[in-house]
Amino acid sequence: MAELANIPWNLILPLIVLQLILMMVALIDIIRHRRTNGPFIMWIFIILLASLIGPILYFIFGRRQE
Amino acid sequence: MNSFSVLLRKELRENVRNFKLYWIPIVFVIFGILEPVTNHFLPEIMKSVGNLPDGAQFNWPQFQGEDIFVSLMSQYQTIGILVIILAFMGTISSERKNGTATLLYVRPMSFGSYFLSKWIVINGIILGSVWLGFFAAWYYIQILFNPVAAGDVFAFLATYSVWIIFAVTVVLFFSAWLSTGAAAGLSIVVLLILQIIDSVIGAFWTVSPWKVSTYATMMFSSISNQSGFWMSIGVTVVLIGALMFLGINSAKRNAAKTTV
């Protein structure tokens, strides 16, 4: 537990919050939009598991325009 | 002027609906925070996960706040430019392909205001994201490193913005001229590969748009090449104007290629 207390949470917290917001935006979009390149479920796993790069990949490659 | 404001509102609404107005700023700010934090904690990160032998001694370079701005800029030069290209490569070409353009082109609108409305909205999104990213980094640099003079930071950001506007104009021009795939390929050649070539053999000349980012980093140091700097800015601005003119013309010429 001592290591956990040593992490400067006040510096890291904004990063974690922003990543969660990005992930939420991607999930809201994928659930409302539902048209993806490739399987819908695969993209949900990519967004959830690949923390920073997943939502970016979804918005660039996974989201079918129109 | 009236149709121009309608087009401007249409662009803005489109970028809200496809979420580009939200995810692009978040991505730039995340990179802006990540850069100072990882550079500050690098010795500790290496100690805990780097698998160094016992008693290994490393002299980590002492980064100044200014160095972090420069290293964040080189992140934006690759990842940021890639995001710009991939997010906006289809701005005009995919409208031709999916039929939105047919709905637009039958109306009495000038292609100038059509192109300009896209140019303004995309530049607004990208410049806003880049500035937000650097401001986030600046906040962390004040905490973790030394304070940086505000005048230097704003001179750096203003110079770098000229390069970003050039990048957006290149992507829009290729999107007006060619199909989405070709636009992406040529934008990558012009913005990423020529940039590498310019940094490898660019010592032979001092004036080029790809040198604007290098001149931006010089705002932090005392080295300066005033004439080269202003010539590069001038050349870049002229190129932006020329690319916009060509983009408007090729959007007009390609209007017949829309799928109905």
Image (spheres, helix red, strand yellow):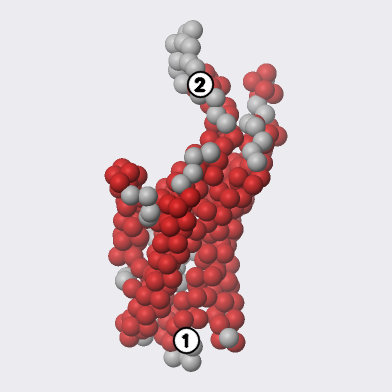
Whether residue B47 sits left or right of residue B174 in the image: it is right
* Of residues A38 and B158, the one drawn nearer to the viewer in this rendering: B158
Q: Of all residues shown, which one is farthest toward the top? A: B55
Chain designation of label 1: B
Query: What secondary structure is marked by label 2?
Result: loop
- Same chain for labels 2 and 1? Say yes or no: yes
At label 2, the amino acid type is Trp
Task: Give the residue displayed 59% in from the left and 53% down from the top.
Answer: B131
Find disc 2 in the rendering and name its residue.
B60
At label 1, the amino acid type is Ser
Task: Give the residue displayed 40% in from the left and 66% down from the top.
Answer: B239
Say if residue A29 shows up in the picture: no
Task: Give the residue displayed 31% in from the left and 61% down from the top.
Answer: B186
From the image, which quarter does the C terminus of chain B lie in? bottom left
Residue B112 position in % (x across, y down): 46, 81
Residue B91 position in % (x across, y down): 44, 70
Task: Give the residue displayed 37% in from the left and 75% down from the top.
Answer: B246
Residue B149 position in % (x across, y down): 65, 41
Find disc 1 in the rendering and name its residue.
B110
Residue B77 position in % (x across, y down): 44, 48
Up-down: is B102 above or below A66? Answer: below
Picture quadrant of residue B88: bottom left
